[in-house]
Image: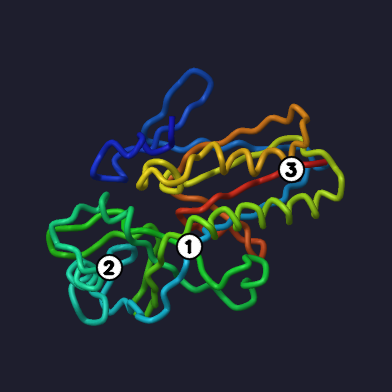
Amino acid sequence: MTSMANLKSADLAIESVQFFDEEIIKSGALMIGYADPTLKFINHANHGFNVLTGMTFEVTKSDSYIIYEFNGRPAWEFLTETLGVPETISAMEMLTISGFAREIPESLWKENDSKYLMMVTIAKNDDKSIILPVSCPVGTKLWLTKRNEKTMFEGVDYIVKNIVDELQGRNPVAVLQADCVLRGRFSLDRILKDEIINRMQAPICKGENIPWLGLYSAGEFVMLGGEAWFQQISSSLFVIYR
């Protein structure tokens, strides 16, 4: 089960399925806390999409996460016109063909192995505004992205290599994984999720029976500069070790 009802609804934010013991929670969040000071974690994430920097989508009217205008035009109208798709396309259909990249501070580029974090349109409104998962004040600049299977796999291999290097031979105590549902068979049946998971587990677990808890998500977090940053269409791993 995914944390977003397997994208069964056209409204992506209608419910977020979590579980706790034998209880299923549809309108909440589950938090796991650790009180062992000897535990540490390594976190890496990667989206593996190509960022198309040829056109800037500048937010010219917004209210927090509701974007009314890009470049002085109604947001949905400008987005669909730029992509060459009809305005009648649904937000769910838009997920498989379009995503946005936002630039992060230069001090975080090396740690993130990228200048950008990814996000997608959550919903469209009757007034041609759109809803994004993070606040975008006026002046925010976004860029379109293009799905690239090759770089998605390369990105997974890259973060796993970094994790293995940072572990320095230590075995993990447990691994927490959040992997976007849009990286797999849901979007055009191109990438099998099992392939991505196997590429993660084999180098990190090395045949050991290590607890691995994960979910297919609608958003993932990565720690950059000591703070949690939100993105989408990524693989994110938290490797706990002692």
Location of mark 3 (residue): 203
Q: Position of residue 194 (x, y in %)?
A: 54, 36
Q: Is residue 13 above or below residue 86?
A: above
Quarter of the picture holding the C terminus: top right
Quarter of the picture holding the N terminus: top left
- Which numbered tag is attached to residue 49? 1
Q: Nearer the viewer, mark 1 or mark 2?
A: 1
Q: Is residue 108 above or below residue 132?
A: below
Mark 2: amino acid: Ile
- Which quadrant of the figure has residue 140? bottom left
Q: Residues within 10 Å of mark 2 (few under 14, many from 20)?
A: many
Q: Position of residue 18 (x, y in %)?
A: 45, 32
Q: Earlier in the sequence, mark 2 or mark 3?
A: 2
The residue most toward the top is 22
Q: Position of residue 98 (x, y in %)?
A: 33, 61
Q: Residue at x 14, y 62 (%)?
A: 87
Mark 3: amino acid: Pro
- Which quadrant of the figure has residue 226? bottom right
Mark 1: amino acid: Phe
The alpha-carbon separation of the residues under discs 1 and 3 comes to 23 Å
Q: Residue at x 60, y 33 (%)?
A: 213
Q: Is residue 114 above or below residue 157?
A: below
Q: Residue at x 67, y 71 (%)?
A: 110
The alpha-carbon separation of the residues under discs 2 and 3 comes to 42 Å
Whether label 1 touches label 3, CB < 8 Å: no
Q: Is residue 43 left or right of residue 3?
A: right
Helix, strand or loop at label 3? It is helix
Location of mark 2 (residue): 67
Whether label 1 touches label 2, CB < 8 Å: no
